[in-house]
Image (tube, grey):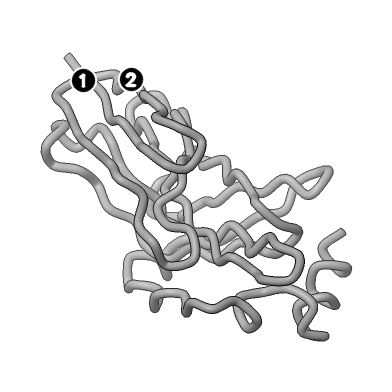
Amino acid sequence: MKQVAIAMTVAGLCGPALADCTLPEATAAAAAWRVIEGENFAFTAESEAMPGLSVDLSMDAPVIPEVLDFVVLDRYGGRIALLQYFSGDPGTSVLVTMVRDAIVDLQSGETLAAPLYSADCQRTAWTWFADHVEVADIDGVQRIVLPVE
């Protein structure tokens, strides 16, 4: 499947090149991460700086994801982190560039969720609380409980 995605991207049939918005530049923190393809076009991201941590990447289209940023949230005692990545550009007549933020519990190593960060360069609304985050997109509001004391 990886070869199909690469061929489609090179041929210009998918990938950020045909979308109306441009992906943000990857940060220096993103460079430490590598994307690994599993079975059935499932992807994870890993970093040598965090051995044993494998972040699940939810995809929106058959492309190779690209890590764009990684941030540990001090507000939650360094336990919660966000791994931002390009998750595809689905569409038929118009491609929509999708960027997701995987919410990661660094203590358990669990990927809590991977809600949309932006669709076609339009940010989704994220509202942070002491024990959860709410993400509002076109499908409604998703409430993600954060494992904090």
- Of 12 and 96, nearer the camera is 96
Q: Name the quadrant of the N terminus.
A: bottom right
> Residue 149: x, y in percent?
17, 14
Image quadrant where residue 70 sits:
bottom left
Seen in the image, is 85 located left or right of residue 78? right
123 vs 38: above or below: below
Which residue carries the number 2 mark?
Answer: 145
Q: Are marks 2 and 1 in contact (CB under 8 Å)?
A: yes
> Residue 90: x, y in percent?
68, 60
> Residue 47: x, y in percent?
46, 54
56 vs 144: above or below: below
Which residue carries the number 1 mark?
Answer: 131
Q: Secondary structure at mark 1?
A: loop
- Of 53 and 132, nearer the camera is 132
**Residue occupying image coordinates x 74% and y 73%:** 14
> Residue 94: x, y in percent?
67, 71
**Residue occupying image coordinates x 51% and y 36%:** 139
Q: Which mark is residue 60?
A: none
Image quadrant where residue 56 sits:
top right
- Of 117 and 63, nearer the camera is 117
Q: Secondary structure at mark 2?
A: strand
